[in-house]
Image: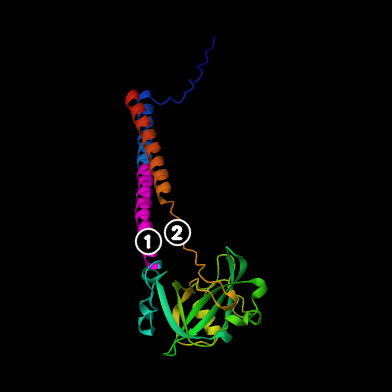
Amino acid sequence: MTVTKGRRQRHPQAPSEKSERRRHRVKRAIFAICLMLLAAALAALGTWQVQRLTWKRDLIARVDQRVHAAPVPAPARAEWNKVNATDDEYRRVIAVGMLANDKETLVYASTALGPGYWVMTPLTLADGTSILVNRGFVPTDRRDPASRREEQLSGPVAITGLMRMTEPKGSLLQSNDVAADRWYSRDVAAIMQKRGVTAAAPYFIDADATANPGGLPVGGLTVIAFPNNHLLYAITWYGLAAMVLALLVFVLRGERAAA
């Protein structure tokens, strides 16, 4: 009688409990480190928003002070290279000169008075330089200068208003079409070049609410608004950081319990 010996099948050994536990701890440690990094990043974002809040409050205070201050002479040619938004935006200024009404430019505007146009007119000063002045708003049906001849002042005028920085290229939704003379932003350099005005200041002036003959254009419509949601953002980021830290504590407690 012949006995055939069968081959013994080998089965892969299951990982030991010790190695499995070690692997589990490594995963938990990596997860805990990721949570710590995430919490740190969220806290950093909250701190950044607190810093932004301080900056925004300072900006609002500075602008409010400028808007209500007595007007000062608009920066002359020698000061143009120093003009910047941080130091000069919304500064109350005054300029005296002659309005170049034949070089008027209309810029599309959407205001509290409805849709229409800003009337942008170069003001020629005694030294031959020019400042672009936003004289105010006119409705669409009064865009033609012939319909508002009363405001075409010919003598020397004093313009009081707020300094504004140039708005190059166009608005958020529309680009200026220089060739077609369609304007959606107050691009000082482009407008002055289109009208053949040289020696132009790099800023423009938003005229105040002083009434013009005939009632148009309507000045004093400058919108000064600075969204300030930084405190809410800071609370949100810090809150998320606290939630992540709570999850981290839960993970660490679970690790201790498993040890």
- Please say if the residues under marks 2 and 1 sit with CB atoms less than 8 Å apart: yes
Q: Is residue 20 above or below residue 165?
A: above
Q: Which residue is mark 2?
A: 226
Secondary structure beneath label 1: helix
Looking at the image, which is closer to me, 69 or 128? 69
Q: Residue at x 35, y 35 (%)?
A: 29
Outermost residue to the right: 141
- What are the residue bounds of the magenta stretch? 37-66
Q: Position of residue 84 (x, y in %)?
A: 39, 72
Figure colour scheme: rainbow
Outermost residue to the top: 1
Q: Is residue 150 above or below residue 219?
A: below
Secondary structure beneath label 2: loop
Q: Amino acid at mark 2?
A: Phe
Q: Which numbered disc, 2 or 1, marks the residue that appears first in the sequence?
A: 1
Seen in the image, is 131 located left or right of residue 36? right
Q: Residue at x 48, y 73 (%)?
A: 206
Residue 42 inside the magenta-drawn segment: yes
Q: Which residue is mark 1?
A: 59
Q: Amino acid at mark 1?
A: Leu
Q: Position of residue 189 (x, y in %)?
A: 49, 80
Badge 2: few (under 14), some or many (20 or more) residues near its Cα, within 10 Å? few
Q: Position of residue 157 (x, y in %)?
A: 48, 83
Badge 1: few (under 14), some or many (20 or more) residues near its Cα, within 10 Å? some
Residue 68 inside the magenta-drawn segment: no
